Amino acid sequence: MNETAISSGDTAWLLVSTALVFLMTPGLAFFYGGLVSRRHVLNTLMMTVGALCVAAIIWVLVGYSLAFVPGGPLVGGLAWAGFQGVGDAPQSDYAATVPHLAFAAFQGMFAVITPALIAGAVVGRMNFRAFLLFVAMWCLGVYAPVAHWVWGIGGWIRTSGALDFAGGTVVHITAGCAALVAAALVGARADVKRAPLRPHNVPFVLLGAGLLWFGWFGFNAGSALTAGGLASLALVTTHMSAVAAVLMWLAIEVWRTGKATAVGAATAAVVGLVGITPAAGFVSPLAAMVIGGVTSAVCYAAIQWRSRLSLDDTLDVFACHGVGGMCGALLTGVFARQSLNAAGADGLLAGNPKLLLTQLIAVAATLAYTLLVTFVLLKLVGLIVPLRLSPAQEREGIDRSVHGEAAYHETTGDDLFDLGAASDNLDPAVM
């Protein structure tokens, strides 16, 4: 394949999509940051930013190569380590009309946000250094192999015929299951029973959800790798799943409590986006609405169930991303239609029940592998650096005890006096 095969339109769309997917990670930081206590908001933001930086380095060094070098059923090779041989010519096995480097960069943004999602399960008590070390190890031990299984040439899940358009299995099931293990091994917050978690900044939550929704158009529609009909389908299905999920969630809230909450709407939008991710390029807009509504209801129930347990998955990463990803993957096996995407397959409603079984096997294998390897990796990290902060650090707040900063500074009487004196000295000509 030579450079003359490159499409400037496809390349431009993929580069824009790469930037949109990058924006999702800061969006996630605001979404998570608004949900936590004000004493931990900077640490929550920093865990997301830290994951972004660590995962990006790992991706370029070896992660991309392990995930996408054509090879055996379990993992790729090292031929593209350090992005060697990843240049401006297309890689026809994956994306025939864009530079190989653009494809690698786009996939790198998926690798970046996936471990950042895990942070939501352990906010307020996990050692920051331990988390960054865990991210590096997890990208190599979990993300890269599963990405190869699902998307890599020769990967066993890809070969089996299972469908995952934009990462329902690779991103959301792996992150959700890892969050479950991390929450269990790090342990619950010291004050989890005495002080129920209340969002300290709901506008942050809505801002983060909005940025995630916006970026998700690149996440899903960008996965078409072309600027055409398939990208258009993925964009529309993404949007319709999200809006259906919000309406379903709010209807359940009103039915149960009589109140429709802003945090509920923001959470539902994310859940709907998670649910459609594996199906976005394989189902119709009407099917996407059903997927969004069903995923929303199931994830709502999962959060209610989790709240009755002693397990402190603080921001319900497993209930939203793990359960949502599983719902989306299985519903892909129900609603997929090959007439919409020749590279896909017909699902249950189109007369092919085998696809649903194939999706179920892929989900089960990813779940089991992620749970096991995440457990081992966290145990190894714990041998190097403590997984959890000391009780004194937790009481003080991680922002101050670990980062030496505070997100908000209280205004004192002296501050008010200084502000008043300053306003008295202003030149009237500039007022």
Image: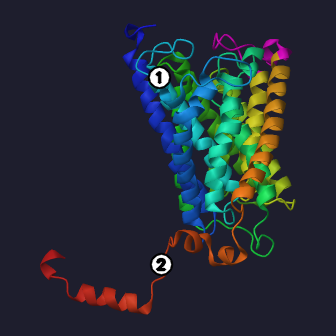
**Residue at (68% x, 78% y) in the render:** 392
Q: Earlier in the sequence, mark 1 or mark 2?
A: 1
Is residue 252 in sight in this rendering?
Answer: no
Label 1: few (<14), some (14–19) or many (≥20) C-alpha neighbours in 10 Å? some
- Per the rendering, the mark at residue 409 is 2
Q: Nearer the viewer, residue 95 or 228?
A: 95
- Per the rendering, the mark at residue 86 is 1
Q: Spot the residue most to the front.
A: 384
**Local secondary structure at mark 1:** loop
Q: Position of residue 374 (x, y in %)?
A: 76, 45
Displayed quadrant of residue 313: bottom right
**Residue at (79% x, 50% y) in the render:** 181
Q: Which residues are magenta?
A: 335-354
For the residue marked with disc 1, what is the amino acid?
A: Val
Is residue 309 in sight in this rendering?
Answer: yes
Looking at the figure, which quarter contains the C terminus?
bottom left
